[in-house]
């Protein structure tokens, strides 16, 4: 049997075999979603591995961890903060109309790989386009934005609306 | 990376399970196919596909956003299958014969089914170390480099295993009288 014949047989057989059983995964996305936690878990130590006898020490550790996560993590719940999850980035900057497209380094990453930056306090109400620059070269739009625009050089900008009093509409 | 895929992954990283559901919808056939090819049993493949997507979601922060997501999810799938094989010692021959061609000639259809059954059984007779790269190459259509990444092997080892896998498969098929396209 020639090489190409064997390869063709392999492809054909595997494809047919899978096609015949494809129904089994018809609802897989729903089954998977049902099992996922509603909030993304952060990497954390396996508590089960910590000796059962040191409950008191473990409790102190839990409290410490909670405090650490709340005070050291990115404040993405704050409407005045822009965030980007990018654990592998070495640096992330914000570039926007309100920075005159000058890259402004973002804080981070936190332990979940989130980079963040607080909007300037003196930012004026209005519509601003913006994006993130990863590792000094890669333009990344904000997936949490509610509006996007295509630029003339075929990139995508996110759009932020700064509202005068009632707060800022942002991703 | 597919259209909008990076955005879906970013949303999933933020805890958006619906975004992950869309990823599952896009990749479930490929992931299931790989699992089926490696495990040779539809029920086990279904479990493995399910486990692979849960594990991938839990470990999504380890995925490098610049890389191809398909290679990464296939690697997760291959690992889930490898663990399953190791855990359950699942080396039994295929028990499920698929309903295959839709040709109008019943005799031809039967012959094609029989031929496919023999080939499936022959693939399943291969050692998992040979079967895994074979499935990733000829079902998932990954290149050598991607298979090497997925299986955590040097590229040279992947080439060697694929070569040996095909030689072994050819030998088994010839023993069973399958010599080429009918």
Image (tube, coloured by chain):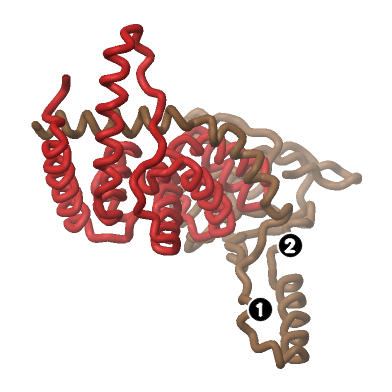
Q: Which mark is residue B100?
A: none
Q: What is the display colour for chain B?
A: red
Position of residue B161 measured from the top left corner of the image (x, y, whole percent):
19, 53
Q: Chain of mark 1?
A: A
Image position of A109 with respect to A156: above or below = below
Residue at image coords 12%, 43%: B171
Residue B94 is situated, as x and y percent measured from the top left of the image, at 36, 42
Residue shown at 39% from the left, 60% from the top: B89
Camera-side residue of B42 and A144 = B42
Residue B28 on image: x %, y %:
51, 38
Whether residue A119 is visible, yes or no, is no
Q: Which residue is mark 1?
A: A47
Q: For the point 68% across and 34% down, which residue is it?
A: A147
At mark 1, the secondary structure is helix
| Image-based side of B14 in relation to B49, left or right | right
The numbered mark 2 sits on a residue in which chain?
Answer: A
According to the image, label 2 marks what residue?
A75
Q: Is residue A65 above or below residue A90?
A: below
Residue neighbourhood size for the residue with mark 1, other residues' Cα within 10 Å, grouped as few (<14), some (14–19), many (≥20):
few
The extreme right residue here reads A165
- Which lettered chain is shown in brown? A
């Amino acid at each position: 049997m020639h090489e190409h014949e064997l390869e063709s047989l392999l492809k054909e057989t595997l494809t047919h075999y899978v096609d015949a059983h494809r129904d089994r995964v018809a609802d897989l996305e729903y089954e998977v979603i049902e099992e996922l936690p509603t909030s993304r878990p952060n990497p954390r130590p396996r508590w089960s591995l910590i000796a059962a006898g040191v409950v008191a020490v473990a409790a102190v550790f839990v409290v410490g961890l909670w405090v650490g996560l709340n005070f050291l993590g990115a404040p993405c719940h704050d409407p005045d903060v822009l965030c980007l999850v990018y654990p592998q980035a070495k640096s992330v900057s914000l570039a926007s109309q309100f920075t005159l497209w000058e890259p402004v380094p973002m804080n981070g990453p936190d332990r979940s790989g989130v980079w963040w930056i607080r909007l300037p306090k003196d930012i004026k109400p209005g519509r601003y386009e913006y994006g993130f620059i990863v590792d000094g070269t890669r333009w990344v739009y904000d997936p949490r934005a509610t509006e996007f625009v295509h630029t003339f050089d075929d990139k995508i900008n996110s759009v932020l609306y700064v509202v005068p009093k009632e707060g800022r509409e942002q991703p | 990376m597919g259209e909008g895929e990076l955005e879906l992954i970013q949303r999933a990283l933020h805890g958006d399970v619906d975004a992950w559901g869309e990823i599952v919808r896009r990749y479930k056939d490929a992931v299931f196919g790989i699992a089926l090819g490696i495990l040779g049993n539809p029920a086990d493949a279904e479990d493995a596909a399910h486990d692979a997507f849960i594990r991938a979601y839990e470990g999504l922060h380890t995925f490098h956003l610049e890389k191809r997501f398909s290679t990464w999810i296939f690697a997760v799938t291959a690992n889930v299958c490898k663990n399953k094989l190791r855990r359950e010692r699942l080396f039994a021959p295929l028990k499920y014969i698929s309903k295959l061609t839709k040709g109008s000639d019943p005799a031809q259809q039967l012959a094609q089914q029989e031929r496919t059954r023999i080939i499936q059984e022959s693939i399943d007779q291969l050692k998992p170390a040979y079967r895994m790269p074979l499935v990733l190459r000829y079902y998932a259509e990954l290149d050598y480099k991607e298979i090497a990444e997925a299986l955590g092997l040097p590229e040279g080892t992947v080439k060697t295993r694929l070569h040996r896998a095909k030689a072994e498969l050819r030998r088994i098929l010839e023993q069973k009288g399958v010599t080429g396209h009918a």
